[in-house]
Structures are given as C-alpha cells and as structure tokens.
Image (spheres, rainbow, N blue to C red):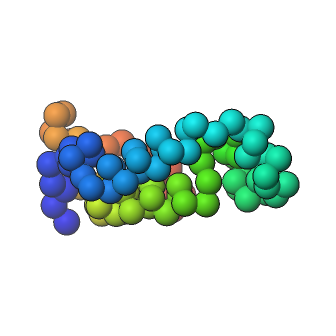
Amino acid sequence: MDVQAPVQLTNLPEFSELETHFKEFSKLQMRQQFEADSERFKTFQVSAADLTLDYSKNRINQQTLPLFNKLALACKLPDAIKAMFSGELVNKSENRPAYIQLKKFL
C-alpha cells in the first residue's frame, strides 16, 4: 500500500460540509444542549479499561460524528493507519516508517 501525498483538508467537499455544520451549531449554548438532551453525557462518552472519554461538553450533536467519519474516509485515513502499523514508509520527511510502540499490542 503506497501512502499518497497528504490531502489538503480544506479543499474537500466533506470539509466544507463539516464547516457549515459547525457554523450552524456553534451558535447554540452548551447549557441549551444539556437541557434539551438529558442523555447527552451518555450519548457522547466512551469508556474502556476504567477510563472514560467525555466529549459531551464539545460543540457536537448526532450529525457531527458522521460528518467527521466522511471526512476521514475522504482523506483515506484508514489506509494511512494501516500503512503506519504495517511499517510502511509514512514519515517521508525523515525517510523512515513511523515509530509505533503500541504496534506489539495489536
């Protein structure tokens, strides 16, 4: 798998979609979001290995995550992650693969 040149995010239509979403959503107050959705913390958090990542206090809603996913796919992020973990040359500025300490655990 050949890792291609980095994609200019701001030129992608998926980025424009996310940017428009943010401009609309950023006008709302977080307090309003919690008042409107009593399950907001449960919806926007993930727990694993006794750790909890709470992202409920960020300016996101149910439409935000799919938009981020579309942008990640447009940038071929899954391919880049696979290349990085397989030891391919992804750090072209230093002409070497990325050093991944967690690789041995996957």
Residue 3 position (above or below residue 59): below
Q: In this view, does 22 lie to the left or right of 92?
A: right
At horizontal 75% and vertical 42% (from top left) the residue drawn is: 32
Q: Position of residue 75 (x, y in %)?
A: 28, 56
49 left or right of 27?
Answer: right
The answer to whether 104 appears left or right of 75 in the picture is right
The quadrant in which residue 68 appears is bottom left
> Quick one: 36 or 89, which is closer to the camera?
36
Image point 16% across, 34% down: which residue? 93
Residue nearest the observer in this picture, 54 or 98: 54
Picture coordinates of residue 102, whole percent (x, y): 50, 50
What residue do we see at 64% from left, 39% from top? 28
Q: Is residue 85 visible?
A: no
Q: Nearer the viewer, residue 13 or 3?
A: 13
Tell me, yes or no, if residue 92 can be seen here.
yes
| Quadrant in which the N terminus is drawn | bottom left
The residue nearer to you, when weighing 15 against 55, is 15
User: Where's residue 64, x and y in %?
Assistant: 53, 55
Quadrant of residue 78 in the image?
A: bottom left
Q: How many marks?
A: 0
Instruction: State the image quarter where residue 49 is shown.
Output: bottom right
